Image: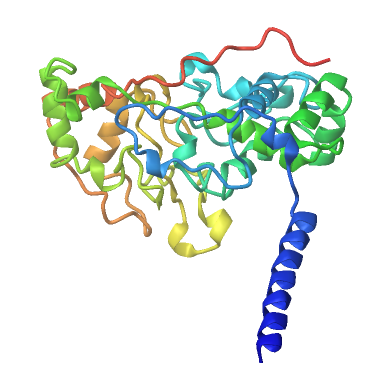
């Protein structure tokens, strides 16, 4: 009996050691990642650190962020060396381009404005219509768009990057392989984009720290309107002022060229003309407004909501006439302008790129 128990114990030990040995052999040990400098993003006042999304398979490192920064600003990563991510996401304009609709390669124009790249780490679905489920997917989408970066496919992008030994060395250091893939490009640019955050605004210092001098009396009145009569918080909720959902607010239903929005992704008729709720942080710097850039000022935007949008069969039931007075609109604009924050101004445009 004792011999049988002893055999069982030894068998159990050998099975355990075998499992450990097998795991060591089959697990993809990324010694390359272990040798890099991990990056801990400091989340400023007003933002929810738990809502910040970093995929497990794409941890942030200083080396990966630097690679992403270079890729983001490099115009050589287009079919004719004229377009970079930063062409439509300009730092001085809070990473928008100030255009109603953005221009890409050969000055071709799309049908939508460039949304800000700030605080994308707090979002899941990306783009106005949410067609990219993650920031990594969004980061590589424009490269294979014929009117943006102009490559026919992502293989052309990878081939272009692989022409430069400097880039090949950086990708090898970050991802541990000589075989550059489009997924590597997406992960690097997404890591850089996650460093573009905005918080610690005057509104945050007033709302969270109780600093009564942080915002004007007009902005204080505007805050009350925002959460009450103006009903803004029904969609612009949470610390990033977005519910991350899609709504039809009547934009485009008063003309001949209707953008179907989210419907193009889901094919659900309820999504006809619906677009993602954008963040309101840095809103004073990201004009013109809406997916087609039709409104030049914040006053114009509020005016659209004030009249109840444009009636259509799929108008969100939250959009109703607000009956805001001119002084109330002025106060609401003052509150929105108090959302100018900190956390993205550190970005420096590269003066040299890998050769």
Q: Quadrant of the C terminus?
A: top right
- Residue under the image location 18 percent in, 25 percent down: 209
Q: Nearer the viewer, residue 234 or 258?
A: 234
Name the outermost residue toward the bottom: 1
Q: Residue at x 14, y 42 (%)?
A: 228
Residue located 60% across and 35% down the image: 190
Q: Is residue 328 left or right of residue 298?
A: left
Q: Is residue 38 visible?
A: yes
Q: Residue furthest front?
A: 2
Residue 202 place in picture, x, y as percent: 25, 20
In the rendered image, the quadrant that contains the N terminus is bottom right
Q: Nearer the viewer, residue 100 or 265?
A: 265
Residue found at the very far top of the displayed protein: 351
Q: Is residue 229 left or right of residue 291?
A: left
Q: Picture coordinates of residue 92 (x, y %)?
A: 49, 13
Residue 187: x %, y % from top left: 66, 38
Give the mark count: 0
Q: Measured along the vertical axis of the image, is residue 143 above or below residue 200?
A: below
Residue 333 seen in the current view: no
Q: Quadrant of residue 13?
A: bottom right
- In the figure, residue 109 lies in which quadrant? top right
What scheme was used to colour the molecule? rainbow
Above or below, 78 relative to 23? above
Residue 250 lies, in percent from the top left, at 37, 47
Q: Is residue 53 above or below residue 316?
A: above
């Amino acid at each position: 009996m004792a011999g049988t128990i002893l055999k069982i114990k030894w068998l159990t030990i050998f099975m355990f050691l075998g499992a450990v040995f097998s795991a060591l052999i089959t697990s993809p040990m990324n010694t390359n990642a272990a040798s890099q400098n991990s990056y801990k993003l400091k989340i400023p006042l007003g933002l929810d650190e738990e809502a910040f999304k970093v995929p497990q398979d794409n941890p942030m490192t200083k080396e990966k962020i630097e690679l992403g920064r270079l890729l983001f600003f490099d115009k050589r990563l287009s079919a004719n060396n004229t377009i970079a991510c930063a062409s439509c996401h300009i730092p001085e304009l809070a990473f928008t381009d100030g255009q109603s609709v953005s221009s890409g390669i050969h000055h071709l124009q799309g049908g939508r404005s460039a949304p800000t790249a700030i605080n994308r780490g707090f979002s899941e679905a990306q783009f106005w219509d949410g067609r990219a489920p993650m920031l990594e997917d969004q980061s590589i989408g424009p490269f294979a768009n014929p009117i943006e970066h102009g490559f026919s496919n992502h293989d052309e992008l990878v081939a272009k990057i692989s022409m430069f030994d400097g880039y090949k060395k950086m990708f090898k250091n970050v991802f541990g392989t000589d075989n550059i893939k489009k997924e590597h490009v997406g992960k690097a640019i997404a890591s850089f984009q996650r460093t573009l955050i905005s918080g610690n605004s005057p509104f945050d210092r007033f709302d969270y720290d109780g600093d009564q001098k942080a915002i004007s009396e007009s902005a204080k009145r505007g805050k009350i309107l925002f959460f009450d009569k103006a009903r803004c918080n029904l969609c612009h909720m949470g610390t990033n002022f977005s519910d991350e959902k899609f709504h039809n607010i009547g934009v485009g239903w008063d003309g001949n060229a209707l953008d179907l929005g989210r419907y193009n992704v889901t094919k659900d008729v309820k999504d006809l003309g619906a677009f993602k709720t954008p963040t309101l942080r840095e809103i004073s710097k990201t004009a013109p407004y809406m997916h087609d850039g039709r409104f030049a000022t914040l006053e114009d935007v509020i005016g659209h909501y004030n009249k109840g949008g444009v009636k259509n069969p799929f108008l969100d039931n939250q959009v109703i006439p607000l009956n805001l007075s001119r002084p109330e609109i002025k106060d609401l604009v003052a509150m929105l302008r108090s959302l100018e924050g900190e956390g993205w101004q550190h970005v420096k445009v590269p003066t040299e790129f890998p050769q």
